[in-house]
Amino acid sequence: MMNCKQAAELVSQALDRKLSLFQRIALWFHSRQCLLCRRYENQTNQLAMLVARYMEAVQSFDPPSEQRLSPEFKEQLRAQLQAALREEDAKTGDAQSTD
Amino acid sequence: MTGPTTKSNISDPETWIDQHGDYLFRFAMSRLRNEETAQDIVQETLLAAIRARDNFSGKSTERTWLTGIMKHKIVDYIRKAQRERPASEFESDEQDVDFLFDQRGHWKDEFAPAEWNANPAELMERKQFWEQLDRCLGKLPERLSQAFSLRMIDGMKTEEICKVLDVTPTNLWVMLHRSRARLRGCLEQNWFGHEGDEGQ
């Protein structure tokens, strides 16, 4: 008989691979009698759906200040991009337009 | 400087920093959790984008395009870091989630999944929820968090992740299970258990 620890492992694996028929049946039997594992399965699946939208969600909110680039780093980066652009222009023969 | 008309429909690279810099940085931070590394990745990404900007087709948005470049940079970084790591590290049991269960494999009372009242669809709109999720992801051990992000946020295939992290599928399933169990527990403790207290 499957216990909760094994059930939780299969709940997770079901998101990463196709469980065998035997595993699916064993999980189903266990969950039928176990409220906690039914909850665990629901919540794990809900979190999976939420997390899949992580990028979309964080894009719609301003990042907290500790997750922004510092002004100093931005300045430094700007200088590097400018240098890289000049280099690229020189390569493609647009050198006369730089300066 | 480059004339704006010469490069199809892409904006001047210098504007990328203001338009997408913070976003890219946050993206890198969510994966790498180290400010210096994240800054390096942002820089590498933008420099690579300058070299590749003729390939930008305009089919996706500029940000999506830059994000795509950055994802590759992050995977490369993780793969390299992986090779420099001692091989024994996976064996460490401190990451396992056996503590959630008693000797017979039943949920221990204090870790048993509680009922959640929140409606997951509404959570999308809650800034605080995503910040809490970030904090919970940040508590995962580094490798678990990398495996989890590649799989659940980027939706990468398990076979590809196995190659990047240099683990077997069985190892990866274990890592993902541990991540999910820990993340669920952290959110229950810090969000779902107390959502009513927040008063908003």
Image (spheres, rainbow, N blue to C red):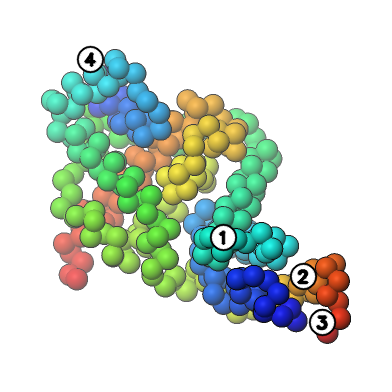
- Do residues under tags 1 and 3 come within 8 Å of each other at their CB atoms? no
Please provide percent x and percent y for residue B57: 60, 61
Discs 2 and 1 carry the same chain letter: no
- Please say if the residues under marks 2 and 3 sit with CB atoms less than 8 Å apart: no
Quarter of the picture containing the N terminus of chain A is top left
User: What numbered label is drawn on residue A1?
Assistant: 4
How many dots with numbers? 4
Packing grade of label 4 (10 A; few <14, some 14-19, many >=20) is few
Report the front residue among B146 and B124.
B124
Residue underneath mark 3: A97
Please give the chain letter of the residue carrying mark 1: B
Secondary structure, mark 1, is helix
Sequence-first tag of 2 and 3: 2
Query: Do dots 4 and 2 share one subunit?
Result: yes
Where residue A99 sits, quadrant-wise, is bottom right
Q: Secondary structure at mark 4?
A: loop
In 3D space, how far apart are the residues under numbered discs 4 and 1 (Cα atoms)?
50 Å
First-in-chain label (4 vs 3): 4
Helix or strand or loop: what does disc 3 sit on?
A: helix
Tell me what residue is drawn at x 29 percent, y 41 percent. Answer: A44
